[in-house]
């Protein structure tokens, strides 16, 4: 509903935000609404490279570094701590400038994607947290 000036209970109520709509309501079926909305995009929709599909604000630099580390694949976290690796396009780069070789290669084919494993999967090490003082294997 577009914001407009209304008269409610004998007093004039002006729009809170005059540049569009602010009428918000809690979603009764948020996931269903989102899926229906996304289904309208169509199969030919192309997203720009580097698009962020979600955001998280209000984090300190330290909290942002921890969050980025937690979102790394396990094989990267096994050998690198918080702030030692960052993403650049489709690669992982250490702070020393070393480009980590990818675990997989993907190839698009009609009707799907083929994934090829490029190297052996490293042994999974139990994750004791971002600032664990235990030695890494």
Image (cartoon, grey):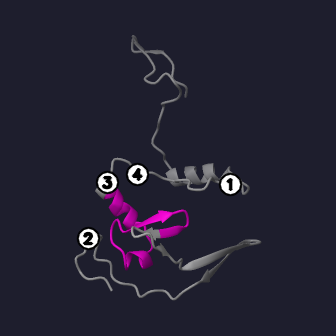
* Residue found at the very far left of the displayed protein: 133
User: Does residue 62 lie above or below 84 as drawn?
Assistant: above
* Front of the two marks 3 and 1: 3
Mark 1 nearby-residue class (10 Å; few <14, some 14–19, many ≥20): few
| Residue hosting label 4 | 56
Determine the secondary structure under disc 4.
Answer: loop
- Answer whether labels 2 and 4 touch (C-beta < 8 Å): no
Residue 16 versus residue 103: which sits nearer the camera?
103
Q: Position of residue 10 (x, y in %)?
A: 39, 10
In magenta, the rendered stretch is 63-92
| Mark closest to the chain's N terminus, 1 or 4 | 1
Which image quadrant: the C terminus?
A: bottom left
Question: CA gap, disc 3 to disc 1?
Answer: 32 Å
Question: CA gap, disc 3 to disc 4?
Answer: 12 Å
Question: CA gap, disc 1 to disc 4?
Answer: 24 Å
| Residue hosting label 1 | 46
Q: Position of residue 36 (x, y in %)?
A: 62, 51
Question: CA gap, disc 2 to disc 4?
Answer: 21 Å
Determine the secondary structure under disc 2.
Answer: loop
- Answer whether labels 3 and 2 touch (C-beta < 8 Å): no
Q: Quadrant of residue 26?
A: top left
| Mark closest to the chain's N terminus, 3 or 1 | 1
Determine the secondary structure under disc 1.
Answer: loop
Which image quadrant: the N terminus?
A: top right
| Residue hosting label 3 | 61
* Residue found at the very far front of the displayed protein: 96
Mark 2 nearby-residue class (10 Å; few <14, some 14–19, many ≥20): few
Determine the secondary structure under disc 3.
Answer: helix
User: Does residue 133 lie above or below 53 as drawn?
Assistant: below
User: Does residue 58 lie above or below 20 as drawn?
Assistant: below
């Amino acid at each position: 509903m577009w914001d407009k000036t209304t008269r409610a209970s004998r007093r004039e109520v002006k729009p809170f935000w005059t540049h569009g709509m602010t009428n918000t309501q809690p979603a009764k079926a948020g996931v269903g609404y989102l899926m229906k909305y996304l289904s309208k995009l169509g199969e030919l929709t192309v997203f720009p490279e580097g698009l962020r599909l979600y955001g998280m604000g209000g984090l300190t630099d330290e909290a942002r570094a921890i969050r980025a580390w937690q979102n790394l694949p396990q094989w990267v976290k096994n050998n690198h701590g918080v702030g030692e690796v960052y993403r650049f396009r489709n690669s992982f780069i250490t702070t020393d400038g070393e480009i980590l070789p990818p675990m997989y290669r993907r190839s698009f084919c009609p009707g799907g994607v083929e994934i090829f494993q490029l190297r052996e999967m490293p042994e999974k090490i139990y994750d004791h947290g971002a600032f664990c003082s235990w030695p890494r294997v």
